[in-house]
Amino acid sequence: MLKRSAMISRSLLGAILYHRSFVTSLSVPHGFRIGVIGGGASGMFSAATAASHITQQQSETKVQVDVLEATTKLMKKVEISGGGRCNVLHDTSKSVPEILNGYPRGKKELNGLLTKHFSPSDAQKWFESRGVVLKTESDGRMFPVTDSSQTIMDAILDCARENDVNIGTKQKVVGVRKEGDEEQFTVSFGDEQEEKYDAIILATGSNPLGWKLAESLGHSIVPPVPSLFTFNTKNQNKEEGQVFHNLSGVSVQHARTTLRIKVEGKKKKKILSQEGPLLVTHHGISGPAVLRLSAFAAREFKDLNYRTEVQVHWSPDFGTAQEIEFRLWELTSLTPKRNIATSCPLLDEDGSTVIPRRLWSALVLESGFDKETTWAEAKKKMIGKLSRTIAEFAVDVTGKGVFKEEFVTAGGIKLKEITMKTMESKKCPGLFFCGEVIDVDGVTGGYNFMNCWSTGHTAGTNAVSRLKELTTSIE
């Protein structure tokens, strides 16, 4: 009998490891095997779901679930998400349409899945049923109250362990084939061994191997490009006198970022815009307003080779440049002796300035004022320029940065080739998909994990349902 080493770990930190053999389906009458390729968030969740579904059915038919992970670590993105706290979901009290607005690609296709099959509330209930208590922060991100990603990993691993999932690490899959009228898949490994599976769940994330395997089984791939990245602005950071020099760590709670793109054959430019907090870094700008724009304009930025101009409105609640100019001009008579560069006169409801003092001072100097100019000394033309600097500030993007280690890819297996209510391939019966391997991606804030949980649960459940159908046909 063909044997491969496997391991199940109750915890990824201080784990107790043990080995056991994968048992081929041919050794068990009417036995079946599900192979999950990839031990990330979606792969592990689909495996745990499939195995628990098998346990609940209490069927006499033997079904074995194997996770095939090429590396030595499981759920790496879960471990590092949210700075090690794991942003497991986005505010589940929001409606599904609201949550779907966090997906630049896949919004329409996920609608039925999140509404009818495995909703954000279902995902929350799943984790809570495993003893995970979740909290929702002011920006909508949801974390375990332990503030530890280990809590989420343990919940999934415990479910897999309790339902006898075989978890194999260092299981490098190099090929999958299904020949002629065969029902089974043949999975080839890097050590030249092979295994037979009755259903395959492809959960390889943004690893190019997954797309290669999908193509070999008849699928088309939307070319992958980076998403969720920061903007490098080296020309505005590097030297004394540049607007962002020495401003690292300064943040604005509500900013708007806008990309205008010239479209061939059209007079009007295509406008992409996003809002949220914005952070100045050593290398450029980051924060949700930047990351959201990078996601929704992922392909446009790729086409521009990540070198373009992005416009920033530092205080969108105060309206257009003209409206801000009117407010500022009033100060020439209301507070004539006050130094312009001292502090931002645009205040929010609690009386605090909307633009931090250091950034405000830099914007004032960028507009041509000196440090000693008072409002009484300000000329109308200079006030106009300052207003445009606030509302229409041109950021010179010189490249893309990295958003921590939580990279996300836009692109993947074409959604039109997948039956989304089951996550089964339309091209190859018995082949299922989940997670980032498909052309779905979300913005930061728990959306990408929600995609993993929903597609993973659906793929796992329906892979078992397919084998149940095969059992009936055999009998």
Image (cartoon, rainbow, N blue to C red):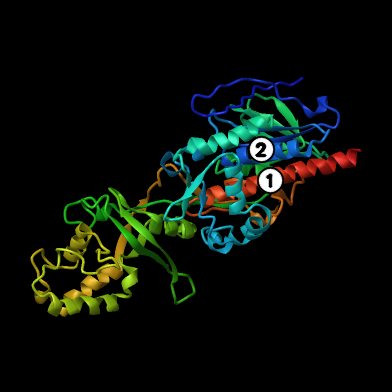
- Label 1 and label 2: CA atoms lie apart by 9 Å
Residue plotted at (21% across, 53% down): 245
Instruction: Please tell me which residue lies in front, 239 or 336.
Output: 336
Quadrant of the rendered image containing residue 114: bottom right
- Rendered position, 75 above or below 373: above
Read off the residue under disc 1.
459
Q: Is residue 215 visible?
A: no
Residue 400 as seen in the image, left or right of residue 418: left
Residue 2 as seen in the image, left or right of residue 406: right
Quadrant of the rendered image containing residue 361: bottom left
Read off the residue under disc 2.
47
Residue 79 image position (x, y, % from top left): 48, 37
Quadrant for the C terminus, please.
Answer: top right
Q: Amino acid at mark 1?
A: Ala
Crowding around mark 2 (Cα neighbors within 10 Å: few <14, some 14 to 19, many 20+) is many
Residue 344 as seen in the image, left or right of residue 83: left
Q: Is residue 237 visible?
A: yes
Residue plotted at (15% across, 68% down): 368
Quadrant for the N terminus, please.
Answer: top right
> Which residue in the rendered view is the most extreme toward the right?
475
Q: Residue 400: which disc?
A: none
Instruction: Please tell me which residue lies in front, 45 or 207.
Output: 45
Instruction: Please tell me which residue lies in front, 305 or 146.
Output: 146
Secondary structure beneath dot 1 equals helix
- Rendered position, 399 above or below 32: below
Residue 395 image position (x, y, % from top left): 31, 61
Secondary structure beneath dot 2 equals helix
Residue 462 image position (x, y, % from top left): 73, 46
Residue plotted at (68% across, 53% down): 117
Crowding around mark 1 (Cα neighbors within 10 Å: few <14, some 14 to 19, many 20+) is many
Q: Amino acid at mark 2?
A: Ala
Residue 29 as seen in the image, left or right of residue 344: right
